[in-house]
Amino acid sequence: MPRKSRQPFYRHHKAHDCAVVTIDGKNHYLGSWQSPESHEKYARLAAMVRVQLLSGCRPQEVMALRPCDLRDAGDGTWHYRPATHKTEHLDRGRCIVLGPKALAVLRPFLERGPEVPCFRPAESVVWHLNGAGRTAGW
């Protein structure tokens, strides 16, 4: 049975006093509860999920999105042609149409250099809880 797609919720993990979101049944720790850092990480994660839901693009395509890859179609939508994608080995092009709602979500992340990814992996790191506790680096 297919799952309903929805944005993950910012929650308080009382045992660790951390902010947490659950995606695909796994907890992702964002930092201290109610800290500016955890809210910033959540906002970035929520924007990535919203763009993905509104455009139908894949997670890796959202991570690779750069302002230089976007083209205005002239009809209120923009086209995103990823440099690499899942079916490129079949000599197929991929064009992802971003409508007004997706562009509104993306706009704060487009104010970077044209070659800089909108969602940089270093900024988008979330912390995972493994069976033994917090992962290294946290």
Image (cartoon, rainbow, N blue to C red):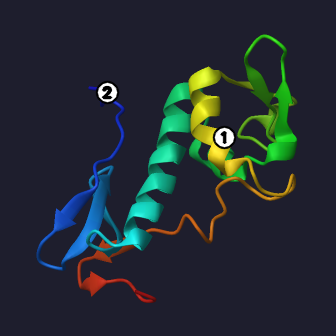
Residue at figure coordinates x 11%, y 77% from the top left: 15
Q: Amino acid at mark 2?
A: Pro
Mark 2, other Cα within 10 Å: few <14 / some 14–19 / many ≥20: few
In this rendering, is residue 119 above or below 65?
below
Q: Is residue 55 left or right of residue 35?
A: right
Label 1 environment density (alpha carbons within 10 Å; few <14, some 14–19, many ≥20): few
Look at the image and tell me whether residue 95 can be seen: no
Q: Residue at x 82, y 31 (%)?
A: 90
Residue at the spot 31% in from the left edge and 27% down from the top edge? 2
User: Nearest the camera: 136 or 114?
Assistant: 114
Task: Return the residue at label 1.
Answer: 107
Q: Is residue 29 visible?
A: yes
Q: Quarter of the image containing the N terminus?
A: top left
Residue 106: name its quadrant.
top right
Which residue corresponds to the image point at 34% horizontal and 73% vertical from the top-left?
35
Q: Quadrant of the C terminus?
A: bottom left
Residue 52 location, x and y as percent? 54, 36
Q: Position of residue 25 (x, y in %)?
A: 27, 53
